[in-house]
Image: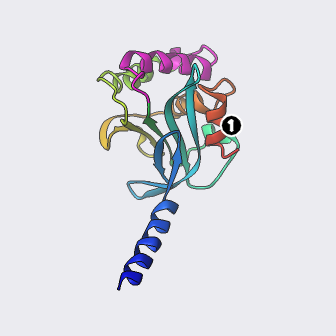
Amino acid sequence: MKRIIFVLIAVFSVSLSQAQTEVGGATLPNTLEYGSEKMDLNGAGVREKFWMDMYAGGLYLQSKSSNASEIMKADEPMAIRLHIVSKMITSKRMIDAINEGFENATKGNTAPISTEIAKFKSFFDEQINQEDIFDIVYLPNNGVTVYRNGEESGNIKGMEFKRALFGIWLSDKPADEDLKKGMLGK
């Protein structure tokens, strides 16, 4: 009987470990489902600042890709999960990073999507805690929906906004070059 229990535990543990990925002290699921859309982890990495891990980030797509430009332009279901691993991330610091990210992703041309950016930043107004999880989900008919710890924060429509948003992590001037490589599976 002990042997059967041990085998069952071993099989369950192997199955469980294959269903998630460890990165930067966080566990990211290998699959996300929103609505009827299923997306697989394309790649993951860690956002570092001053040699300290800030958050683990994963990019989820329906088909694997390492082409950042195509991913940003694609009108297909995709998501980014941010798992906060540092107590140093505050709402203000996150909003400052978002401002910088949009500036870099749009090469300074944020005016056409300024209303959308303001709404997106409002999703980060509440205190951010270590272990918070943000899912940024794009579905073609719905636009971008942000979830915090599984609760919907809000929705923003528009491909121009979506391209700039995903550009924060995937543009030529990303938030973190190593995180970009990780998300692209490199």
105 relative to 83 in the view: left or right? right
Under mark 1, the amino acid is Ser
83 relative to 60 in the view: left or right? left
Which secondary structure, mark 1?
helix
* Residue 176 image point, x, y percent: 61, 27
Instruction: Say above or below: 158 vs 114.
Output: below
- Residue placed most toward the observer, 12 or 161: 12
Q: Quadrant of the C terminus?
A: top right
Instruction: Say above or below: 174 vs 23.
Output: above
Magenta includes 169?
Answer: no
* Residue 41 image point, x, y percent: 55, 51
- Residue placed most toward the observer, 3 or 9: 3
Q: Which residue is mark 1?
A: 69
Instruction: Say above or below: 185 vs 118.
Output: below
Span of residues in magenta: 86-112
Q: Residue at x 64, y 53 (%)?
A: 64
Q: Residue at x 48, y 21 (%)?
A: 98
